[in-house]
Image: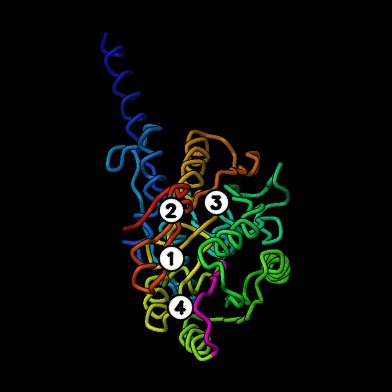
Amino acid sequence: MGAGLVLPRLLFAQAAKVVTVAVLFIGDSDDDELAAKPFFDAMTRFGWVEGKNVNYDKHSGKGTRQYLDTMVSKAADSEPNLIFATTASLATAVMKEAKAVPVVFATMADPVAANLVSSLAKPGGNATGVYQVPGHADTKRYKLVRELLPSLKRLGIVFDRSNPDLEARKASHLEAAKAAGFELSVAEITNFEAIAKVLAQFKRDNLVAAMVTPSFALTGRRREVGSLAERNGIALIGHRSEWADAGAVLTYGVDTGEGYRRAAAIVNRILKGAKPGEIAVDLPNRFELVANQRAGIALGISMPKTLLKRASRVIT
């Protein structure tokens, strides 16, 4: 009888084990944690309750590359059970520091090109995750800009030179812009500090709208970018919904919330014993349009009712 009492207690102790998931954000943790809420909500639905059987060790990159290595080292040194990197840049940095810790990523950059996995079907190594393939998003986004600003002829665009697929991105945008009847004024940056000069130059060139493309430096400090754009009278167009919350008048791209939910499903499998290298990279294909009517009004832009009706979300 005594042994019968001990066994359930041992099982309970094993079941009560608390795991640690390090979560890496590129920008301010308050903004990025709110954007990643679908991930934490999904984890709860999978039975992972913070403070009960999982602890989240959250780290903010503060939107600066200089802080990136320090943040990643700190996360790796804490010896978590798993690291969730919310961008490809973070995942790349993590894998240099923590080669034995399972890594799950959520990225819009090709994880094969970024050397995160050997292949999408068979990642190998210690990483897997979610790759939200841009697909037709660039073409669709330019069509939406044309609908929003029908008389616009020239559009500014900002690229980050550090992206491994920079040339492919530029080619895709140039083709999509041409199809929609736009001439692009291209600017390339390597750090956040350059964006103020870029936007000021766009203003001097009489540009009234500019598109931002994936960038560690800009996404991590997107609210500051939004403020600078408003100050220069530039309507920002973004590739993910977080940019609309930061002041962009329009965003169209992959549904980041869906990506976070899919990432949580992978994290759940790994925490329950699956090996990351044996889990195929997930490829969600849901897209979302977010219209920031408030930002449009501030810039004197009247949004077509047809566009507003199609939006997944409207900020008023």
Q: Which residue is mark 1?
A: 249
- Residue 254, numbered circle: 3
Q: Quadrant of residue 230?
A: bottom left
Q: Is residue 209 magenta?
A: yes
- Residue 305, numbered circle: 2
Question: Dot 1 lies on which element?
Answer: loop
Quarter that holds the C terminus: bottom left
Badge 3: residue crowd in 10 Å (few <14, some 14–19, many ≥20): many
Identify the residue at image location x=35%, y=23%: 11
Task: Please provide percent x and percent y for residue 229.
Answer: 42, 78
Quarter that holds the N terminus: top left
Is the Cβ of the residue at disc 4 closer than 8 Å to that at disc 2? Answer: no
Task: Give the left or right position of residue 9, taking residue 159 as reference.
Answer: left
Task: Please provide percent x and percent y for residue 222.
Answer: 42, 70
Q: Is residue 145 magenta?
A: no
**Gap in angstroms between the C-alphas marked 1 and 2:** 14 Å
**Gap in angstroms between the C-alphas marked 4 and 2:** 22 Å
Q: Which residue is mark 4?
A: 234
Q: Which residues are magenta?
A: 205-213
Is the Cβ of the residue at disc 3 closer than 8 Å to that at disc 4? Answer: no
